[in-house]
Amino acid sequence: MTTTDPAAPLVRFAPSPTGYLHLGNARPALLNALFARARGGRFLLRLDDTDRERSTQEFADAVETDLAWLGIVPDLRARQSDRAAIHDAAAERLKAAGRLYPCYETQEELERRRRRQLGRGQPPIYDRAALNLTEAERAALEAEGRKPHWRFKLEPRTVTWTDLVRGEAQVDCASLSDPVLIRADGTYLYTLPSVVDDADLRITHVIRGEDHVTNTGVQVQIFEALGYPVPVFGHHNLLTTADGEGLSKRLGHLSLRGLREAGYEPAAVRSLAVLTGSAEAVRAVASLDELAALVDLDHISRAPAKFDPHELDGLNARLIHAMPVEEVAERLGTLGVPDDVAEPFWLAVRANLAKVAEAGDWWRVVTGPVTPVITDPAFIATAAELLPAEPWDAETWKTWTGAVKARTGAKGKALFMPLRLALTGLEHGPDLAGLLPLIGRARVLERLTGGAEA
């Protein structure tokens, strides 16, 4: 959904292409996309690919594939690796303003310093020792082969903002170490490029996980130091498993790719990712517009959004049970179901499916071969004798079983179970009133008589 309305929101989803997206990533992606959708706004996909070693084109392509599967089509796209010049320019401005300063300590030296601070009961924050170095001392350190990393000098104040999810929020920056923005090898950490790109791309709302709250306090100061307008922030709770385990790229079974390959419907994944941990009951919502109407950021809980992966099975099944044939016709075709019988077949079997691919099992029951289970040969012989002539329709099962009941006196389970076992070889399954016309008289008769003779 695109718009040129300057007042409409522009939001972004900014994953690092260093692995496959998982269910936890789907939450911010969807919350942003649905927020924009409900307000006539736009959605930007920005690949934060400043990690040169781990970012790959394979993962970048997978991000696009996963978002498309969820129904998210970005209005705009950007890659941080294409924007190095504006990151460098911003860094130089901060250096010139005295807000970005060089530090030469090694990780070992910093760790020893932190241990001493803790031993003295002091907070383990950086002591800004590098600010006291003279030009000669810096030159001597560089002569040793040390290359500086660069820290942003925080103002010792409390940053406040009105959060879309949390309400009035604040971060006491006096309690934080000056963050490293540039590594000794010259590469950027997440913090500065994110601010620069949000400002340059004119992002109006930053909606992300609550694990970024402290980052926001720091980034607001960077926005202000560079003279950029500060976007509106919202920090939602994070999806966790039922036992509180956070989601990560190592949980392959919860990757969007894995869920797709396992046969889950995107609408089920969307519903779980968005509604868990909100004031709305988790339920199967098929439409993106309907889901967008349910998203109210200030109704998201502050507690972790715990979910049971098995809940996805229930959502998926409920979606399928109400799904019209038009949404699955192409997939039914790949399972071998002809177009001319797709609708009656789907209506007959969908209530018994947890995933669409399971329809293939029932099509094989329709077309055979099936190994009949004959529990009462005499009963089945009588049923075969009373089998109606074609053409068959939805009333044929009722007509046939009525005639068998009248002849044998069988009713209820004693009437229906022997017929089901003979026709399908299974004790449970779809209503045979719908399946019978699809199986057809010739195959029904073969299963009844062939089983009896055996």
Image (spheres, rainbow, N blue to C red):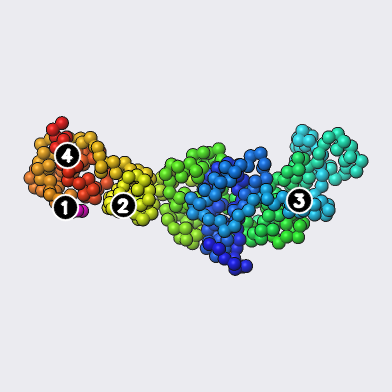
Judged left or right of residue 254, residue 225 is right
**Amino acid under label 4?**
Glu
Q: Residues within 10 Å of mark 3 (few under 14, many from 20)?
A: some
Give the class, few, some or many, for how many residues have Cα within 10 Å of label 2's Cα (few <14, many ≥20).
Answer: few
Badge number at residue 88: 3
In the rendered structure, the answer to whether residue 62 lies left or right of residue 383 reads right
Q: Which residue is mark 2?
A: 339
At horizontal 47% and vertical 58% (from top left) the residue drawn is: 288
Is residue 55 positioned above or below 202 on the image? Answer: above
Does residue 122 appear in the picture of this structure? Answer: no
Q: Secondary structure at mark 4?
A: helix
Q: Is residue 98 highlighted in magenta? A: no
Instruction: Give the residues drawn in magenta, as a range.
Output: 391-396
Q: Which of the 4 image quadrants contains residue 366? A: top left
Give the foreground label among 3 and 1: 1
Q: Are marks 1 and 4 in contact (CB under 8 Å)?
A: no
Looking at the picture, tell me which residue is in the foreground, 224 or 51.
51
Task: Indicate the amino acid at tag 2.
Answer: Asp
What residue does disc 4 label? 446
Percent x, y of residue 66 = 51, 48
Please give the name of the residue rendered at 61% of the width and 61% of the height, measured from the top-left corner.
Answer: 10
The secondary structure that dominates the magenta segment is loop
Q: CA distance from mark 4 to mark 2?
A: 25 Å
Mark 1, residue position: 391
